[in-house]
Image (spheres, helix red, strand yellow):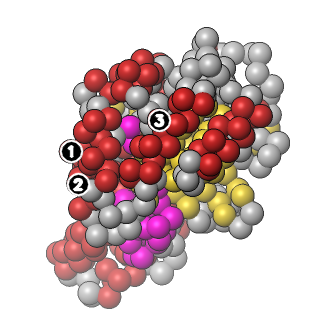
Amino acid sequence: MNLLDVAPSEAQQLIATWVAARGEPAYRARQIFPWLWQRPVASWEDATDLPSSTVAALGQAAPIPRLQLDTRQTSSDGTVKFLWRLPDGSSVESVLIPEGRRRTLCISSQVGCAFGCVFCATGRMGFTRNLDPWEIAAQLRELRLMPDFEKPTNVVFMGMGEPLHNWKAVDTALTILNDPSGLGIGARHITVSTVGIIPNLARLAARPEQFRLAISLHAATSELRASLMPVERKYALDHLIPALSAFSRRVTFEYVMIENVNDSRENAATLAQLARQVGALVNLLPLHPGGAPGFNTSPPADIKRFARWLRDLGVRVTVRRSRGMDISAACGQLRVERETESASRPRMTVTSNSN
Ligand code: SAH
Ligand code: SF4
């Protein structure tokens, strides 16, 4: 049994059945359950209110699966990047971004990514496999097991992988993250970022919780978008935009600023049209280096000017500060860096194998 790989309500039932089959009192199930997510333990031995015979039996029947912390790097701006080793030896990253009272954890949904956006380091790795629900949610659970981190307040699916290309697992992981008997992060504090896999967008929208949706747009014409994001050939703007207009929820457009590629006044005008159509907030991001040889970020002044053009056209805009630049804490870059053993990047605090 993997009690972490199912929705908390299902885990509760599995535990109740298991407890009953062992002839233990029913309250035992209520003792076991909170150790999964609410007061997570590293192993059943740490579940202090359980008799040792139950601990031993649980260890046999339902061992707690773990992610191994491979590397942890802390940026000068407080951003922390974690590289997790999965049971099959592959690895993914999460990034913790503190900002005022907010602590946002950026998590991965796949090992690699099949979508090949030209500016993205994860895209360049190609696709290895989907994460299981527990592997997604455990990126937060493992933090809860470390004494030096407070619980994140927000979760964004902006690490490695395309969450709507792994909908089944992400669907369950969303429940675990949000459920008060799971990790208890409010739905409005959980953002799914996607290139726009239209059929699964509808499945996400059909969930009653108010999860936030971010669409990686990056270009407002089909031609330009197709040159940056191959997915445009399958799920084109012509279909994506009407699908988004049909949502009752607020949508954010992610727009990475690439110098001389998508940062002209004309680009701003076409983008403004789409944003107004959908009622979207536009989030401008500097391009992180390392994802794409041959592309540069638009300089800060140009990003500001682009934001002003959009605002003048009646669009709500935020400009995201680049975080964790010194540890290349963007989309899948840690793994790329390790695999190419690049020595040229500044080395920050690196803690190995600390769990
Ligand atoms: N696959 C999903 C979620 C993971 S990527 C998606 O694409 O939305 C998370 C965000 O990082 C996306 O908006 C993505 O476009 C952006 N991103 C990828 N490479 C980047 C880079 N080099 N610099 C800045 N943002 C990047
Ligand atoms: Fe995949 Fe998102 Fe990177 Fe595109 S930007 S390659 S969809 S992870």
* Between discs 3 and 1, the one toward the N terminus: 1
- Give the magenta-colored segment's residue range: 174-195
Whether residue 173 is visible to the viewer of this picture, yes or no, is yes
Q: Quadrant of the N terminus?
A: bottom left
Q: Residue at x 72, y 40 (%)?
A: 304
Q: Secondary structure at mark 1?
A: helix
- Give percent across and percent down for residue 77: 80, 46
Which amino acid does the dot numbered 3 rest on? Answer: Thr
How packed mark 2 is, by other alpha carbons closer than 10 Å (few <14, some 14-19, many 20 or more), is: few
Residue 293 found in image quarter = top right
Which sits in the foreground, 125 or 343?
125
Q: Is mark 1 within 8 Å of ligand 2?
A: no
* Between discs 2 and 3, the one toward the N terminus: 2
Q: Which residue is mark 2?
A: 203
Q: Which mark is residue 199?
A: 1
Which amino acid does the dot numbered 1 rest on? Answer: Pro
Question: In the image, is residue 293 part of the stretch drawn in magenta?
Answer: no
Q: Which residue is mark 3?
A: 270
Q: Is mark 3 within 8 Å of ligand 1?
A: no
Answer with left or right where residue 207 lies relative to residue 328. left
Q: Residue at x 69, y 15 (%)?
A: 342
